[in-house]
Image: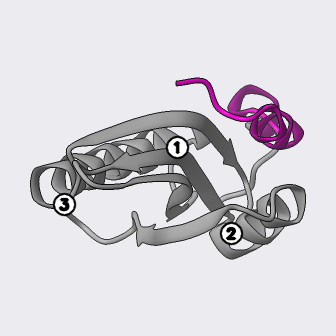
Amino acid sequence: MPYHSSLAKLVGTIKNIDTASNGVKHGTKICSCQILVLQTSYRRQKNFALFAERTNKKSFASDISFAKKVIEREKRHMQSLFYDKLEVVGSVSDAIDCKSMFKRLKTKNKSLYLYDILDADIRR
């Protein structure tokens, strides 16, 4: 099912991984986010944001890749225990802490809900 055009505008306002990777210093917080539609047999919930935050240690691209893997692992866990279907309707990554990214996204879309901010620095 297509998502709202306001969500497309919202995702488009955040810098893309390719543009954000230039000039990111070591020690900077990096955030990756996926906007989800969560569905059970009884209920469909829209605009849930799942974040993973990592401190830039190696390169921006490898740290973002690791944060995305943490999100994918959490989504598999969510689907196996709680939800029948998960649909990704948007994805953003940037060199910013996840709380600030959520605040920025929330100002663009009032119906956005925070599902969780995962710590991607913890060894899993």
Colour scheme of the picture: one colour
Q: Is residue 85 left or right of residue 11?
A: left
Which numbered tag is attached to residue 37? none
Instruction: Report crowding for label 3: few under 14, some 14 to 19, many 20 or more residues within 10 A (C-alpha).
Output: few
Residue at 73 percent of width and 37 percent of height: 21
Which numbered tag is attached to residue 82? 3
Is label 3 in a helix, a strand or a loop? loop
Is label 2 in a helix, a strand or a loop? loop
Residue at 57 percent of width and 50 percent of height: 32
Residue type at the position of mark 3: Phe
Counting residues from the N terminus, which is met first, the one under dot 2 or under dot 1? 1
Residue type at the position of mark 1: Ile
Count of picture labels: 3
Residue at 44 percent of width and 50 percent of height: 67
Q: Looking at this view, is 110 or 51 the one in front?
A: 110
Residue 32 is covered by the magenta coloring: no
Residue linked to disc 2: 97
**Placement of the C terminus among the 4 image quadrants:** bottom left
Q: Position of residue 76 (x, y in %)?
A: 20, 46
Q: Is residue 40 above or below residue 17?
A: below
Q: Position of residue 52 (x, y in %)?
A: 48, 60
Q: Which residues are magenta?
A: 1-20
Which numbered tag is attached to residue 64? 1
Counting residues from the N terminus, which is met first, the one under dot 3 or under dot 1? 1
**Which callout, 2 or 3, points to the residue nearer the camera?**
3
Q: Is residue 91 left or right of residue 79?
A: right
